[in-house]
Each structure stands twice: as structure tokens, then as C-alpha cells.
Amino acid sequence: MESHYFTAPFIQQLMREHAPAQNITVHKVTPIPVDNSASILVVLTAGSTDKFMGHFGLEVTYEANGIAEKRRMVLKAKPHGDEIVTMLNTLAQLCGGELAAVYPQYKALTGFQHTHMRELEVYGKLPNHLSPEIYGLRAEPEHGVYLILMEYLEEVELLNAVMQPQKWTDAHIRTALKQIALWHAAHLERQLPLDKTHWTDVPSKAYMLQLEPLWQALLQNAADKFPDLYTPARVALLQHAIDNLPAYWQELEQMPKTFIHNDLNPRNTCFRRYGSEFEFCVYDWELSTWHVPQYDVVELLSFVLDAEKYDLREEYLEFYRQELHHLTGQFEDKALFAKGFYLAAYDFGLHRLGMYMMAHSVSPYPFLPRVANSFFNTLEQAQEASMDFPNKAYLANS
């Protein structure tokens, strides 16, 4: 059945459905090599299933409105969310301890249950300046097949550059922040044409409190497995967040929300260059959700700022705030915006970084210790700036 998806008739059908006005005729489809290694979810899940999944390079010769074209494309076959959930639960069991005991009851709530549909929803219903060019989308639930036909990213800069943060220049970082601000502004506090049944785990105070035992278990797993990275002082910072979840989320719930990428890092981004100008390109939207816009910035800066650039974090945050405020008029208060950034950092540390460390316990990621160090520097800067969330006395009066 898999070979059917690489034929000219199927690719033609996919492209015609996506762009019916272009009168597309596909003449030839030729397989070409493509690297799958950067997709963590695909690599981990492929080992536990025989389902059709992965990234497949194709050179497609076709006509569109009578004009001959030859494009290199990637057919992305996504695993079903159930398979990712099962794979992650297996990783939790391999970690042992409290995490193995706790994880199963929350396994469908950690953001991965609907990954097979979220990216198709985003590409199909939220066309935007950030994403790669999309040529076709297809969901075949009866076969467990979820497909994205997209451009083959080549002649771009910093593709899969997660191990090379030093190559992210000031110009790259500012371009990324400026262009992600455009995305955040366009979707700020808006009703979007997305099927919300694929987003049953949007972060909120109720959600974070419901999963509190999981955040505790993820933190303990990281502390036990990586004591040099999760020092007692660092663990105390995240334990303080767990102990005060209602307080800091009471503040976050009052802040404007937008539709965020929720995996915004050099594993999922690259740049096109046009002379001296850059264009930011962002892909892999399967973890997208709603949160304060600062959340994406927390993650991006944790990945691209190594130790000699930590002191630039606040400068980049302020650059992003100015861009977002210019576009929306809603973020004039610099101190309040910074507080939203630091509160979002606690969420990132408890959830996304905790999940990363769970996987790292079983299948090490060379980039992760550096990212964790950068992230913890974010929390340390929050302490230095007295950007803490309310203490327990606040809760008693709330």
C-alpha cells in the first residue's frame, strides 16, 4: 500500500485537492534521499510500529495552469497520536520509579494525543508567512495515514542547527523574534477556524493542577537521573513552581493568549536569505497550542543562547515585546510582560523540559544539557530581577 503514495496519480490527486484552481497534471514522481533523523517523534515511534511513517523525498515533474514545473518535495507521513502516546508511556516505564507509576494515567494529556491532526489543521486552515510551502494534505483514518506534501527545504540557513547555537547570529535571532511576533499578533485573543477536538489539553490553571503529580514525577526523574544538571538549587526553583501552581497560573490566566508553536527551536526552523535579509521558516506544528506569546520566546532563547550570550536574554525579550506591542498595542507594561515571560518559563520547565528529560533518560540527546543550562539561567535571572510569582500568603487571600 505504501508505494501507492509515491505514484504520479496519487501526488496529482493530492495537489489538485489542495489547489483546485491551478489545473495540475503530474507527469513523473522520482524518489530522492531525505534525512529523517531530526524528527525525534518519528525516530522514536518508528521503532515501535510497522505503520507507514517518516519523511520521503520526491522530485515531482508537473504542469500547473499549463506551465511546466519540477519541484523537490517531502511527503511527511505522520504517526497517529495513539502511537506516540504509547511510545512515550514506554519511555516512562523504562525510567522506572514514581514516573513509571504516575505516567499512564496522564499519558493522553501531555500534548501528543492529537499530533496526527494538529499539523494538518494548521497548514490547511492557517496559511501563513512562516510555514514551508504546502502542496497537499490528506487524512485517511481508516488506514491510519496522515500526510503532508511540502517543499523540500534546501538552500536555506541553519536547517537542523540544534547543535550549533553559535551560528545563530544577532541578525538571525532578531529576525526570528520579529517574524514570530507577527504570527503571535495575528492570532492574539482570536477565535481560530480550527477543530478544537484536536486541542483537548490546552494549558490552563485547571490543566496544570490536574497534572501536578506528573510534573512532580518528571522533576524527580530528572533530578535522580541527572544530578549534575538538576542540582538541588535548580530543583528547588521548579519545586517552588509546583508548590505554587495556583498562584502563578492565576496570573497567567489574566494575560492575553495566542496560538503558539510550542516547539519553537532550531530543530524545527531555518532561514531563507534574500541578499542581506532573512526570512524565518517554521515547521512541525504538531504540538501547537494556546498560551501567552512569551512561551515561544522562552523556548527559542533557551535553545539559541549559550553561556556567553545569557546576558542578552532580557535585551532580546525587550526587542520582542516592542515588536509585539507595535503590532497589537497590548503590551506597554515592560515589567508585566517580563513577568509573563518568566511565569511561562516555569510551565516550559515543568512540562516540555520535563518530557525532554524523560526521553533523554532512555535515548540521550546531545543538545539537551546545554538547553537545560540555558533554561535554568532564565529562572536564575527571574530570581535576580525579583520576577517571582506570589507566595502562599497570596493564596490565602485569593
Image (cartoon, rainbow, N blue to C red):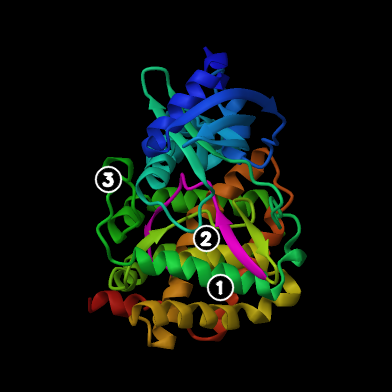
Q: Circle 3 sits on which residue?
A: 196
* Residue drawn at 76 percent across, 59 percent down: 164
Q: Position of residue 336 (x, y in %)?
A: 39, 83
Q: Circle 2 sits on which residue?
A: 349
Q: Are marks 1 and 2 in contact (CB under 8 Å)?
A: yes
Mark 3 or 1, nearer chain start:
3
Q: Position of residue 32 (x, y in %)?
A: 70, 29
- For marks 3 and 1, give the one nearer the viewer: 3
Please indicate whether residue 113 sits to the left or right of residue 191 in the image: right
* Residue drawn at 57 percent across, 85 percent down: 384
Q: Circle 1 sits on which residue?
A: 379
Please indicate whether residue 384 sits to the left or right of residue 31 in the image: left
Other residues around mark 3 within 10 Å, as few (<14) / some (14–19) / many (≥20): few
Q: In which quadrant of the rendered view does residue 73 lie? A: top right
The residue type indicated by label 2 comes to Gly
Mark 1 or 2, nearer chain start:
2
Other residues around mark 1 within 10 Å, as few (<14) / some (14–19) / many (≥20): many
Q: Is residue 279 above or below residue 44?
A: below
Count of labels shown?
A: 3
The residue type indicated by label 1 comes to Leu
Q: Is residue 49 visible?
A: no
Q: In which quadrant of the rendered view does residue 273 lie? A: bottom right
The residue type indicated by label 3 comes to Lys
- What range is drawn magenta here? 277-293
Q: Is residue 197 above or below residue 392?
A: above
The tag on residue 258 is: none
Other residues around mark 2 within 10 Å, as few (<14) / some (14–19) / many (≥20): many
Mark 3 or 2, nearer chain start:
3
In the rendered structure, does residue 281 fall within the stretch colored magenta? yes
In the rendered structure, does residue 135 fall within the stretch colored magenta? no
